[in-house]
Amino acid sequence: MIFGAILAGGIGSRMRIVDMPKQFMPLGDKPIIMHTLEKFLTCNQLDATFVGVHPDWVGYMNDLVAKHLPHAKDNIFVVAGGNDRNGTIMNIIAAIEEKYGENDEHIIVTHDSVRPFVSLRMIEENIAAAKEYGAVDTVSPAIDTIVVSENGEFITDIPERTKMYQGQTPQSFKITLLKELYASLSEDEKKILTDACKICAVRNHPVFLVNGSVTNMKITTPGDYKIAEAMVGGNLID
Amino acid sequence: MINHIYQLIAAGTVSIKYEDISFGNKVIVRPEYMALCHADQRYFSGQRDAATMKKKLPMALIHECCGRVIYDPTGKLSVGQRVVLIPNTPPENYKGEIYENYVEGATFRSSGYDGFMQELVEINADRVVPFGDIDPKIAAITEFVSVCVHACRRFNAIAHSRQEHVGIWGDGSLAFTVANVIKAMFPEIKIAVVGMQRQKLAQFSFVEETYLSNELPSDFKIDHAFECCGGGGSYYAIEDIIAHIRPQGSLMLMGVSEHQVPINTRMVLEKGMTLVGSSRSGRADFEKAVEILEKRDIQHRLRVIIFEDKPVKNIEDIYRVFQSDLATPFKTVFKWEV
């Protein structure tokens, strides 16, 4: 089976606009996370979609689903998130396996709740590639030159730009593979390896690349939020 | 959710418009296959006059499309059901006196309103027609077939009952499809196709007669005619038809021309002819078109006029499809994977 996993465990410390986590802020006429969740619901290949939110916001998220998506509520499950990104993914995997059992063919399509401009193509290509390769990342070719600095003062290296990509989501995996690799990490490694695809990379498991898009932006700062509002023709909030 | 709408903003330039849509009281369809129409190509390549371009753009192109149902609030269609989409939307107070494709207040997608080049299409429940055993590549041209069905239905309603010989002027995709639809709806009618190219005429293996227009015998007669040329060919086709049609024959005009076409009205009057303009189609025509397309032999024949381009995943692919369409005499069909 194939499962969507919307990651919304954060509490929005970088946004500082309101006390509400950024994924619950309105974009156009509805919360950012609802745009993201609705796009996942349009993918016929997904059997169910899980949403991992901060434990304090589980009730709020359940209310949103009941209010906005009554027709789909049986296929949406809200799960309390973990301490970090991978912790939230592991909580979702635990919830999936509790409900649907363990199976080597289970695939999870993880996605940032604050990337509402994700396209159905990206989700579909993630699923197809996850079936074939086991691990998939969505990337966009780097537009700016990437500069490496070990100390933050002087340039250490400038890698060839044509080989540089910016990591986005969805990131998709065969669940058994991801669990196996995550279990192999030490506690110290878990603190550093916050990106699920990096876990695969450091354990030398190939990760297939799917084309993302510049517009598949992560709404993280007030500037991003203004751009996103302008893109959907919504009301700008300063 | 945020829908991605691929709009033509100027000749040769497509840009994405983002629009919030919801699971509300309309059906949501994921487009699967699309077909290009000359009308789309005329917008894309800037062949329409400047005033029309300014008035109608920006808008998403394409009005020939089939897809799968994502959501249906009426509960009549199951999720995943394949449907063809009707680009014409009659006004809310439509009463049925005038055909829905001509009635004032009707809107048409990819002519002033966003066409089907969208990630997801939000559409009224009565604007989708489900289909079963039709290859989706063929189903993509259902609108094209329905336009031919509409012309045939009007022909049947207007033309006098002596319908032994019908002439079709044109040897392109429209003429080919009209010939197929006539054979499906009125199998007793004998068809003569008049065209410009021998190779194209050779494709009409299922009609009784074919003629090169410059070799048409002087004693050639038909009871009624369908003009399927359009453009610069309209004048010559209509002149030929008026010369060869029997008295009180009906002429179904189907080809679009950007320029005014002189018509020999003296002979139209003398023969008591009926000239009927026929364009676009409505739901009844789509339903009949689906019924016709479900016949395997028709599907096999229509494959001849379809050129399947590579799938479209992004704006660059859209440019490629419109470019390659210019180099093919066939109907360009492509899978939509944005």
Image (tube, coloured by chain):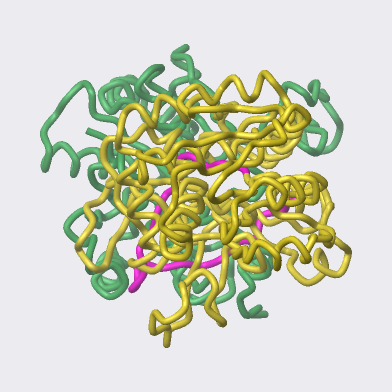
Chain colours: A green, B yellow
Could you tell whether A149 is left or right of B112 in the image? right
Most foreground residue, A148 or B63: B63
Could you tell whether A125 is left or right of B44 in the image? left
Most foreground residue, B162 or B119: B162
Q: What number of labels is visible?
A: 0
In the image as oriented, which residue stretches furthest toward the bottom?
Answer: B93
Q: Is residue B76 above or below residue B324?
A: below
Q: Is residue B8 above or below residue B204?
A: below
Q: Residue at x 27, y 35 (%)?
A: B133
**Residue B240 inside the magenta-drawn segment:** no
Q: Residue at x 25, y 57 (%)?
A: A78
Residue A16 picture location, percent across and down: 58, 71
Q: Is residue B11 above or below residue B94?
A: above
Q: Residue at x 74, y 27 (%)?
A: B215
Q: Quadrant of residue B262?
A: bottom right
Most foreground residue, B187 or B3: B187
Residue B80 picture location, percent across and down: 28, 45
**Residue B25 inside the magenta-drawn segment:** yes
Predominant SS of the magenta segment: strand
Q: Is residue B325 above or below residue B76?
A: above
Could you tell whether A129 is left or right of B219 in the image? left
Asked whether residue B286 appears in the rendered view, the answer is yes
- Which image quadrant: the C terminus of chain B? top right
Most foreground residue, B254 or B192: B192
- Which contiguous range is marked in magenta? B14-36
Residue A212 picture location, percent across and down: 59, 38
In the image as oriented, which residue stretches furthest toward the top?
Answer: A204
Asked whether residue A5 appears in the rendered view, the answer is no
Residue A44 picture location, percent across and down: 31, 44
